[in-house]
Image (tube, rainbow, N blue to C red):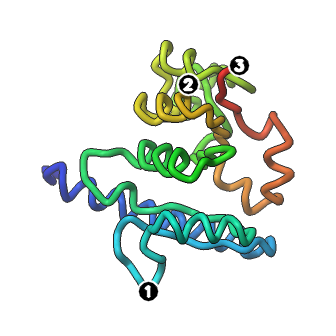
Amino acid sequence: MGIPRTPADHMGMLATLFNAIAVQQALVLQGIPVCVMSALECPKVAESYNWTKALKYFESGHVVLFAGGTGNPYFTTDTAAALRACEIGADVLLKATKVDGVYNKDPLKYPDAIKYETISYSQVLAEKLQVMDATAVTLCRSSQIPIFVFNMRRLIEEPLDELLKQTDKGTWVSGQ
């Protein structure tokens, strides 16, 4: 459409807020306490991101969903997720997406795509797999934060803790 990069990135950041609200509602339906924090100020639908407040939510047993990217154009939402995961010392980064894991090629385009149950950060980077951008994967690797890639629809179908135990429901990316 010829939209310049900066407003296009703003639109992408807003889309992550929509997705966070959807995930929030799926978790609420499971009885999980959850908070959405956004790098974009949208006080009627999400709290503004604050590192100290996010840590307090975690201490009280909440799931915190980070939305709005970094709040700056030219940074992907994957990089923003990895940055937040590093900032808070996350145990895992959850990557909810359209497919149920990491594949050797796009499974939506190629029916013969092969799914990985587990894969290393280095292999993701070496094979240039499009699960997340290289900066995000590198940030997680440097902080040894595993990434779990899964289909977002799974959150509606089953509890998150069960989903994380079933390797066939996604792919774990780690140091291996």
| Residue 87 % position (x, y) | 51, 50
Structural crowding at the residue carrying mark 3, measured as other residues with C-alpha within 10 Å and reported as few (<14), some (14–19) or many (≥20): few
The residue under label 2 is 110
Of callouts 1 and 2, the N-terminal one: 1
Alpha carbon separation for disc pair 3 and 1 = 42 Å
Q: Which mark is residue 44?
A: 1
Q: Residue at coordinates 36% horizontally, 55% vertically from top-left?
A: 70
Structural crowding at the residue carrying mark 1, measured as other residues with C-alpha within 10 Å and reported as few (<14), some (14–19) or many (≥20): few
Amino acid type at image mark 2: Tyr
Q: Quadrant of the C terminus?
A: top right
Structural crowding at the residue carrying mark 2, measured as other residues with C-alpha within 10 Å and reported as few (<14), some (14–19) or many (≥20): few
Q: Which mark is residue 176?
A: 3
Dot 2 lies on which element?
loop
Dot 3 lies on which element?
loop
Dot 1 lies on which element?
loop
**27 vs 126: above or below:** below
Residue 62 falls in image quadrant? bottom right
Of callouts 3 and 1, the N-terminal one: 1
Which residue is more in the foreground, 67 or 145? 145
Alpha carbon separation for disc pair 1 and 2 = 41 Å
Q: Which mark is residue 32?
A: none
| Residue 11 % position (x, y) | 30, 61
**3 vs 106: above or below:** below
Residue 114 falls in image quadrant? top right
Mark 2 in CB contact with mark 3 (< 8 angstroms): no
Which residue is more in the foreground, 63 or 21? 63
